[in-house]
Structure formats: C-alpha cells, structure tokens
Amino acid sequence: MTTAMLVSILMTLIAASTPLLLASLGELVAEKAGVLNLGVEGMMLCGAVAGFAVAFSTGSTGFGLVAAAFAGVAAAMIFAVLALSLMANQVATGLALTIFGIGTSSLIGAGFVGRTVTRLQPVFPAALSEHPLLRVIFGHDILVYLSLALVAAVSFFLRRTRPGLILRAVGENDASAHAIGYPVIAIRYAAVAFGGALAGLGGAYFSLALTPMWADRLTAGRGWIALALVVFSAWKPGRLLLGAYLFGAVMTLELQAKAAGVSWLAPEVLAMAPYLATIAVLTMMSLGRRTGRLDAPACLGKPFSAT
Amino acid sequence: MLEWRRRREPSTLMLALSPLIAIGLTMLLGMIVFTAMGYDGFHAVGSIFLTPFLEPQRWADIGVKGAPLILIALGLAVGFRANVWNIGAEGQYVMGAIAGTGVALLTYDMTGWWILPAMVLAGILGGMAWAAIPAFLRVKLQVSEILTSLMLTYVAVQLLYFLVRGPWKDPGGFNFPQTRMFTADQTLPMVLEGSLVHLGIPVALLLAIIAWLLMEKTTAGYAIKVVGLAPAAARHGGFSAARTTWATMLISGALAGLAGLFEAAGPFGQLTPQFPVGYGFTAIIVAFLGRLNPLGIVFGGIVLAATYVGGEIAQSTVRLPQAATGMFQAMLLFMLLATDVLVRWRIVWKRRTA
C-alpha cells in the first residue's frame, strides 16, 4: 500500500468518524445527567436539513453550521418539555423525536433534493491542508478539530469541574441532588440542549461536509449507532473517541471495499456491516462485564419530579 | 396560580379522553405548522384527517393500511406493557415477508390450498426468528433490546435489497429489482369481491379481540402487566422477567412477521425494494394512541391509516409533500405524550398565599 493511499484512507476514516463522535458526545453528556434521549437520529436530521437550507440560501457554510446547532437544540427542547417537564416516558418521547426528525427533514428538504452547496472547507491554508502527507493532521474542516477539542473539554468538565460534578450527581441520584438544592430539571434541560446542539452539528456534517448534496434520510441510522457508542464508551469521553473512530474505520472499510469492487461480497452485505458491528460490540461489552448494569448513570431514563 | 397536583389514582376518564384531546391538538398544531410552511393549512389538515372518513370509497384503503398497523401494534403493546421495547418491528415485518416469499418462490410451479398457509407460517416464524435475536441478547447478556432490534431492521432491509437485486430477481422481469408475482394460490383471498379488502383485515380485527381477551382475562396477561409495572413484585409473585421478555418479543415478532407476509401476499403480490414503508415505526404511534389496549389499538390503527390515505389526498389537493404525513404522525405522538400528563396529574387553581 502506498503512502498516498494510506493518507487518503485516514482522511476518509476521520471524516466518517466525526459526525458519530459529535452526536455521541452530546448524548453522553445528556445521559450523564440521567436523561436517555433516543431522538439522536431525529435531532441529527433536523440539524442536517437546517444546516443545508441555510447554507444553500445564504451561501455561507458557517451560517449553516450555526443554524444546524440551533435546529438540534430546538428539537432537543421538544424532547425536554415532554420528557422532563411533563414526565413523559423517555423511550417513547425519544422515538417520537426521531420519527419527527425524519418527517420534518424530508418535508423541508423536499425542495432541495439533488441541490448542492459548497463543501465545508479545511481550516488551515492550502500549503498545509493540501500537503500530501501533512494533510492527515492539517487537512480537516472545523468540525473535526472541534469534535476532538470537545472530547477533551467534556472529559475535563465532567471529571475536574464543580458544575461537571453536579451534572453527574443529578444523573446518579436525582433525589439527593434535589435535596441538596440543585435544580435537577434545569440541569437536565441544559444537558439535553448540549446534546441537541452536537447532534445538530453531527447531522450537518453529513449535509455540508461528507456529501454536500441534499438527500432524504442521509444520516442512515448513524444516530442510533451514536447511541450504541455511548454504551460502548461506558460513559467515558476517552473511550467514546476510540469507539467513534473504530466505527469510522468499519465504514471506511465498507467504502473502500465498495470502491475496489470486491465482487464476492455484495454491496448490501457491506452496508450491513456497521449495524452488525454495533450489535457485536454491544454484545461484547456485556460479555466483558460481570457485575452491575455496565456503568450507566443510576438515574438514566427515570423521570424526576420534585413533588 | 395554576398548580399541578398528582392524582391519587390515574384518571380513567382522562385515559380515554386524552387520545381525543391529542388528536384535536394535533389538528390545530398541524394547521399552524403547515400554514407557516406556506401550504393551505386548513385544507391540508382537513384532507389528512377528515376526507378519508367522509368519502366511503376511501374506507377500503383505510382497512388495507390499517391491518398491518393494527397487527404490529398489538404485538408491540404487549411488550411495551412489560417494559420490553421492541422498536425493530419494521425489521421483523420485512423478515416475515422475506420468509413467506421464500416459500412462495419454492412452490412457484405447484398448486394447492396448503401453499398460502405454509407462507403464513413461514412469515410468522421469520418475524419470530428476527425478534428472538434481541430477546436472547437481552435475557442472556442484558444487551438493550432497543438498540439491537433497531440495528436488525437495517440488516433486514439490506437483506431484502440483496435478495430482490440478486438471487430472487424475477428472471422475466426485464432486470427490475423485484421478485416474481405470486400465483393465485400464493395470494391472499379478497373478502369483498372487486374491492381491496383482503383476508388480512378481518384477521387483524379478530386477533385484536383475542389479544384483548388474553391481556384482560388471563393470568399470562396479568403477569405481563405486573412485570412492567412492578418488576420486584413480579419476582416475588413468581412471574419470571426472562420468560416475559421472551414471550413478548416472540409475540410481537410473530405479529409483525404475519403483517409483513400479509402485505407481501396481499397488496404487493411480490417483493420489491419499496416494500418497507415504515409501518413498523408508525405502529409504535398506533400502540400509544390505543393506550396499549388491543381494542384501543384498532381505533389507533384506523386513525393512523387514515393519515396515510389522507396524506395522499393532501398531495393532490394542497400539494403537500408526502413527507408531511410522517411529520404529522410524529406530532400526534408528541401530543399524546403531552396529554398523558393529564392522566396522572390534575390542574388546580390555587390562590397565592403569602
């Protein structure tokens, strides 16, 4: 294998991993606060379509990203009102959000099918970003660096800061956190909003960076894989990074095999790979552990009311 | 000021009333949202929700679309009651159709009354087998059935694509990715001659009544509810959570598989890549709209089927894209979840005290 090929494969891998990393990192924070939001796929699609629509009409990819983050937050707020304020079942509400995101994105996107926008550009000047070798490090767009920086930031926030500690307390024991005087619901709202913003950006990565052309349901279930990654990570940002890049590798393999035209393997079988890999990984996680419920926050998915 | 008070007991009145309130609110919200998006919101909602019921020639279509929704939702509701979240019904639906089609292709040059029952059996087993995977992983390894059942949906759909583009492609089909058309012995008989009403519709209604009897009048149904509501009490009462997971997953897989086979051997008459239309996901809304009660699910299935039929009407009357139907259905589920709060809580007016 030539160096050029290796560089190109690494570039694909990093690009494929980034939306997964963004979306799952957001979900990790929400789950750390005790909220199970299964609507990741829906929030990603809302972000994807909002990002595309704004980038298409303003001509600015930057505005598109901002819009995507806002759309993700807006979608997350629907979830928050229902699941946190009205104490609806979180599983059902998350599912509803995903169904909503699929419908809304394809309704808004109906006028954009097949349209293209300018792809999200690399951050660094061409001398670095197009260098045959150095582009592995310098050839990426803003979201790649942002996602990596956020892994470090979230890890630091959760482990080393007081607000991070409070957020974890809310997820581990909401009743105690409330008794001490922390605003459980408000903190959960904030965590869900953060999750929505990152899911929105993750979705926009599909419509603005990976394939800057609108297509229906372009996230193709990656939101669900992001949810599985949080389980895989045992709710640790560092392991989440590993998991996201592992899945990026699986998808890159799929793309490479497709491009190389591996004839004995049907393309449909290759397309199954990420989903089968997810099941395999979830199973291995369970096999590898013998005690407790993985390391899930104790109050994950349970509604909380102060009265 | 207004204050929420927790009810001592869930309100049975609100339990029955809140789906209707939710439907009303969804219609209102739909008008606002569709108008804001530049469509004729008033007529859009009218087309989606009212026209299908007002025009008798649409009723058969409501039945055709309602039958799979009711069948799948019946199974899902049993699981949801026990806190078993099978959200991969779409995959089990597709696998049921694939298994049934397998039998159809094997018996292509045969005739006999036994062929359709064999396909039905294969469809049921196909759905059950696909549901057995998440059941096994949940019971033996505590892997969340939510994620595994959903992942398997994507796998099933890819398998369908593979089969219709490859080994099962109709040799006389001009290279279109689809199987042969089923023969007369492989197709569901019509209940009303010259209409769309196939055997699957009365079967769905009959199964709803059977499911209601099972859930309300037998110990097994009681056990499922107890496991969902109070797992600890269920353990003390000798009801096994593992057995409940197995039973509910297999039942929902079987019903989804049956629905898939009915759809393949009924309206489709073959397998094509367009086969998965999302009934497995919409059935989740049906289950909630029906309050997880089998008879309520018949009502929920009819309402959601009407939105499909009405969505098609709205495409021609107010040029609303088909995707609007999905958004509308999701809004209905949001409203249902929101109005659910009225079952457990009541609003009281309290004077502010110093």
Image: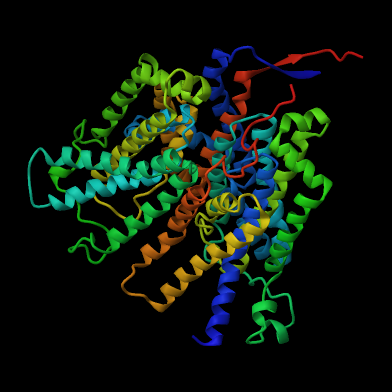
Left or right: A25 as drawn, with respect to B67: right
Q: Residue at x 73, y 65 (%)?
A: A62
Residue A60 is at least partly visible in this image: no
* Residue B214 pos. (x, y %): 34, 20
* Residue B210 pos. (x, y %): 31, 21
In this view, B192 is above or below A55: above
Seen from the viewer's position, the closer of residues A38 and B185 is A38
* Residue A232 pos. (x, y %): 56, 52
Left or right: A39 as drawn, with respect to B269: right
* Residue B241 pos. (x, y %): 44, 29
Residue A151 figure quarter: bottom right
Residue closest to the far front: A290
Seen from the viewer's position, the closer of residues A14 and A61 is A14
Q: How many marks?
A: 0
Task: Give the colouring mode of the picture.
Answer: rainbow
Residue closest to the far right: B354
Residue B66 figure quarter: top left
Q: Residue at x 71, y 56 (%)?
A: A67
Q: Quadrant of the C terminus of chain A?
A: top right
Residue A243 is at least partly visible in this image: yes
